[in-house]
Image: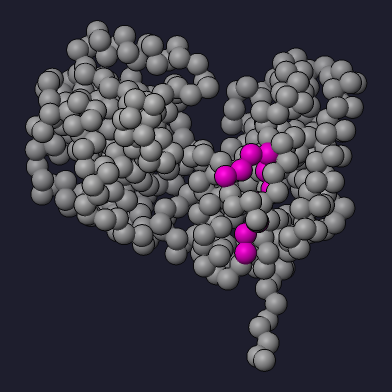
Amino acid sequence: MRIGFVSTRFAGTDGVSLESGKWAEVLEEMGHEAFWFSGRSDRPPEVSMCVPEAFFGHAENEWINERIWSGHKRDPLVTERIREVSAYLASMLRRFVERFQIDVLVPENVLTIPVHVPLGVALTEFLAETGMPAVAHHHDFYWERVRFSSNAVPDFLDMSFPPRQPNVVHTVINQAAQEQLALRKGISSTLVPNVFNFEESREASDPWAADVREEIGLAPDDFFILQPTRIVPRKGIEHAIKLVAMLDDPRCKLVISHDSGDEGYEYQQMLEHLAEDDGVDLRIIADRVSERRQRDSQDRKMYTLWDIYPHADLVTYPSVYEGFGNALLEAFYFRKPVVINRYSIYVQDIEPKGFQMVEMDGYVTRETVREVRRLLFDEGLRGEMVDTNYELASRFYGYGALRKALEGALAQTGCTAPEEVDP
């Protein structure tokens, strides 16, 4: 079948872009073809349709967002603009479907989180008018975000985020979302967690990334403690700083891979001051991490996050909340021991699988520190732990599990690939 992915953006390393790429990879292995509709895209142009107005950061959409996410009263002009943009995007969706002869649509979070209300409305109405089958991939619902709690568009949220339509199959990434979707919308869904290609092997030696530790200023006997996330409050990075402070070993260096991005720098500044007060060697290497290998304006190497992981001795993941936890799967893949805060989705969905990690419940204890210290110095214990995690993650969160889930979701649409006819 010819499957059309739809979102505001398919570019970069955000969760939607990454997971949609994994879905497409598995679907193509199953014999299907993938096509892309979005406002920004890094997908091959020959299989993509890029419509700037579909991007959540487009000026027209930002104008609308400024007027619908504060207060409960909506100006008629805003309603008119939502309708006009929606009508235009619906016409572009029709053109996309016709151009690539799409059989099934896969809305990627665009019917889930209302960062682009006109696009969600456009897609909902297009699906209602055409009856085209769709498998909606939901990552973050609006009720999971405080910033959407006060709004002037409850009618559109009820209509399109997500819609209740018989031709739409719904998939969610965690059990809590599945329960809330049923409770709030009366919609049943299939649980399809985030995955990683554990079948893909990595080269043991890599000349480009061989000097990572040296380039970020680590000595050979330093302990490289990696926080492989952006600097945002829900990541709970203050707990990682507290852990390193309590380890009380100058060889322990806390390295954060990314900066705050577009969410402000107040939290990052707080972390820097906290690390200084606690005597923690904190290194933010966002200026050396890129989406691809290259050299910067100073002729320094830029590494990918995957170049960084192999050099870490320990991964910290003290998140307060996660929709799932992609960095956790990456740590399992690279066979790194993990210190984790037991956030709700982890407790409900991941912990019961039997993974072995140093766990904390919202704060660092002396027992946490003892377990981490033991891990850093006991190679046998580390090896046993990471091997167990790799095997479990391969079974529950590998491409094989995704393949089965996608087969089931496509079967629910009632749309199947045509049978091959022998010549």
Residue 96 in view of the camera:
yes
Residue 198 found in image quarter: bottom left
Give x and y (percent) for residue 171: 61, 52
Residue located 72% across and 68% down the image: 414
Instruction: Give whichever of 223, 378 is nearer the camera.
Output: 223
Decide: is 273 above or below 109: above
Give x and y (percent) for residue 76: 90, 21
Give x and y (percent) for residue 257: 35, 30
Query: Is 177 colored magenta in this rendering?
Result: no
Residue 105 found in image quarter: bottom right
Q: What stretch is highlighted in magenta?
A: 33-42
* Color style of the picture: one colour
Decide: is 423 above or below 265: below
Residue located 29% across and 55% down the image: 202
Quarter that holds the C terminus:
bottom right
Please tell me whether the stretch drawn in magenta is mainly helix, strand or loop. Answer: strand
Instruction: Give whichever of 270, 243 is nearer the camera.
Output: 270
Query: Is 39 colored magenta in this rendering?
Result: yes
Instruction: Give whichever of 381, 94 is nearer the camera.
Output: 94
Quarter that holds the N terminus:
bottom right
Residue located 78% across and 35% down the image: 118
Residue located 83% across and 37% down the image: 86
Residue 224 in view of the camera:
no
Left or right position of 336 against 15: left
Residue 224 found in image quarter: top left
Decide: is 203 above or below 404: above
Left or right position of 136 against 96: left
Left or right position of 345 against 120: left
